[in-house]
Image (tube, helix red, strand yellow):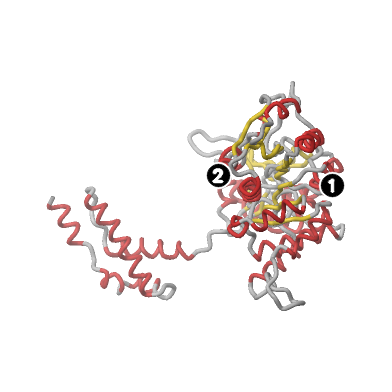
Amino acid sequence: MKTMENGFRQLPAVDKLISHEQIRRLGREFHHDYIVELIRNYLDEVRLSIAAGSECPSIDEIANSITIRGYALIEVGLRRVINATGIIIHTNLGRSPISREATKVMGLIASSYSNLEFDLDSGQRGSRNVHVESMLCLLTGAEAALVVNNNASAVMLALGGLARRKEVLVSRSQAVQIGGGFRIPDVMQQSGAKLVEVGTTNCTYVEDYERAINPRTAALMRVHLSNFSLSGFTHKVRLEEMVALGLEHGILVLDDLGSGCLIDTATFGLDPEPKVQDSITAGVGLVFFSGDKLLGGPQAGIIVGKKELIYKLKKHPLARAMRIDKIGLAGLAVTLGHYLKGEAINKLPIWRMISAKATDIAKRAESWMKALDGIATIISGETMVGGGSLPGATLPTRLLAIGGSKRRGKASIAQSLARQLRKRNLPVIGRISGDLLLLDPRSVLPEDDPDVIEALKESAAFCKAEYKR
């Protein structure tokens, strides 16, 4: 008890800490009121620690801890990294990078006023949706379009606005979980619609949908298997069959495509990814897809389809809660413009990566290897498209491989180098395979090669030292 009392008595007062040299320096960055709050919060933690039996730290230790915490608060957490993992649409690294043209316009709109919801012709209030709706209709063949903040919001808005307290039929194989633990059944439940699974995990037939239709059925829904695939003895209902069944019974057909592809992926040796315009041609009521996957734009949830259905969603209260912000809208408009101009493959980073020639990738891998002065090799490998697009599909690539040696009781050379590359001011992120660190040029834009080469040159001495140990 005496030890605890002594500890409490040794705690410095707030005023004494404010006059400490380190805290005074911190005060040049923070307003006085927040400095006081930081001190009080930290002293409360120290009191709890003392009560648990710990000794009271010195005033210098307390001041140092508060200073570290203060600077950590104002340090920008999001940082640019170089994605050499070989996963092009990498969810953990921000999905699709956007074009330089989109970046420029987004910065301009973010730093100034804009005609976001202002009609420059009439001088009256306008709609933010007009900036992209006509473009989306022209690209997909849809009658109307609406953009919200992400694809999960798009699905929830549509189900809440068109199927609340009613049933939506979904193939059992499509009641999937997407990234971050979000599940289609949970999204549907939150919308107020009731999910009814039909068919089996591997085989669903149009008759399964037909048997499940009743007066409470509001929609038939297809959910694209964007992050896994079913193989072997399987059967799935074609979208045209679902549309025909929907027309026969007067029931809405919805299509959650997720990835939002507008380009024929088979052109690049990949499996065909369902295209948005094909779903519209098939006659579905609404199609949902993301802006930051195969579309190659900023985060967005895009809904295209029948005019009367889009109109209902535009008037729904949730549409305002889920609407896209002005910065994302500006980037999306530029991205769609690339498609309309026929320059998407040359301008959008993900399509530049997907369409990159094998000979060019090999040359770049060679230049990376030279930076490590003979302590790396080049091997054949595969690049994944990733990000909930083209599940299991890969593209051939050439990989820079570093490591090949394990040390008992210590991290491998590959792990040590990967950690060092992550801790740079401009981190380079690779992937570990066995005892090798692999760096893939395909998921890195050619203009970023100088930064990768600089990072590897800095690491050459480290690698050589590690091999000698």
Measure the C-alpha gap from mark 2 to mark 1: 45 Å
Residue wearing tag 2: 190
The type of residue carrying mark 1 is: Lys
| Residue found at the far bottom of this picture | 123
| Residue found at the far left of this picture | 2
Q: Residue 247 carries which label?
A: none
Query: With 344 as the anchor, is 424 left or right in this view?
Result: left
Mark 2 and mark 1 in contact? Answer it, CB < 8 Å. no
Q: Is tag 2's residue or tag 1's residue first in the polypeptide sequence?
A: 2
Residue in the image at 87% along x and 43% along y: 267
Residue wearing tag 1: 357
The type of residue carrying mark 2 is: Gln
Q: Position of residue 463 (x, y in %)?
A: 61, 46
Which one is in front, 387 or 417? 387
Q: Is the residue marked by circle 2 packed among few (<14), some (14-19), or many (20+) residues within 10 Å?
A: few
Q: Where is residue 213 in the image (x, y as percent from the top left)?
A: 69, 31
* Element class at badge 1: loop
